Image (spheres, helix red, strand yellow):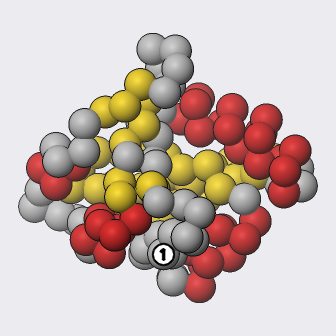
Amino acid sequence: MTSRHATTTLWRPVGPKELDLVRELNWRAWPPRLPEQPIFYPVLNEDYAIRIARDWNVKHDGAGFVTRFEVESEFLHRYPVQQAGGRTILELWVPAEELDDFNSHIVGEIRLVHEFR
């Protein structure tokens, strides 16, 4: 599927449970956040996503995965880039209540690009 709009590539490190939920949504959307997850935070670079999946998700969930997806760039301007540590540790903070709107601006499918166990 192609879009008339420019897109931005984002990554999201996930554990097995969230990956299963994305699969159930046909790789087209992110599942609703849990009450203890007020923010959905995709990241802006693959290396950062790999570090989280490999170093955090594997330790906590037994496996970690990195997904890649495209979102309409113009839509993303409402979410300022957050620097969560070093200069390459960049995230977008999407409030949980805006996730349905965010999902509607995903272009194409969410793809699984790395797996760590």
For mark 1, give the secondary structure: loop
- Residue 78: image x %, image y %? 17, 48
Q: Residue at x 40, y 65 (%)?
A: 96
Query: Would you say 72 lies left or right of 66 here?
Result: left
**Above or below, 78 relative to 20:** above
Query: Would you say 116 lies left or right of 2 here?
Result: right
Q: Which residue ends up furthest to the front in the rendered image?
A: 36
Q: Residue at x 54, y 61 (%)?
A: 37
Q: Quadrant of the N terminus?
A: bottom left
In depth, the one of 52 and 38 nearer the eye is 38
Query: Would you say 51 lies left or right of 68 here?
Result: right
Is residue 71 at least partly visible in the picture? yes
Dot 1 amino acid type:
Pro
In depth, the one of 68 and 104 nearer the eye is 104
Q: Dot 1, how many residues are within 10 Å of its Cα: few (below 14), some (14-19), or many (20+)?
A: some
- Residue 89: image x %, image y %? 50, 25
Q: Residue at x 25, y 37 (%)?
A: 80
Q: Residue at x 25, y 71 (%)?
A: 101
- Residue 32: image x %, image y %? 48, 75
Q: How many marks?
A: 1
Query: Where is mark 1, residue-wise?
Result: 32
Is residue 113 at least partly visible in the picture? no
Query: Would you say 90 lies left or right of 76 here?
Result: right
**Above or below, 117 relative to 23:** above
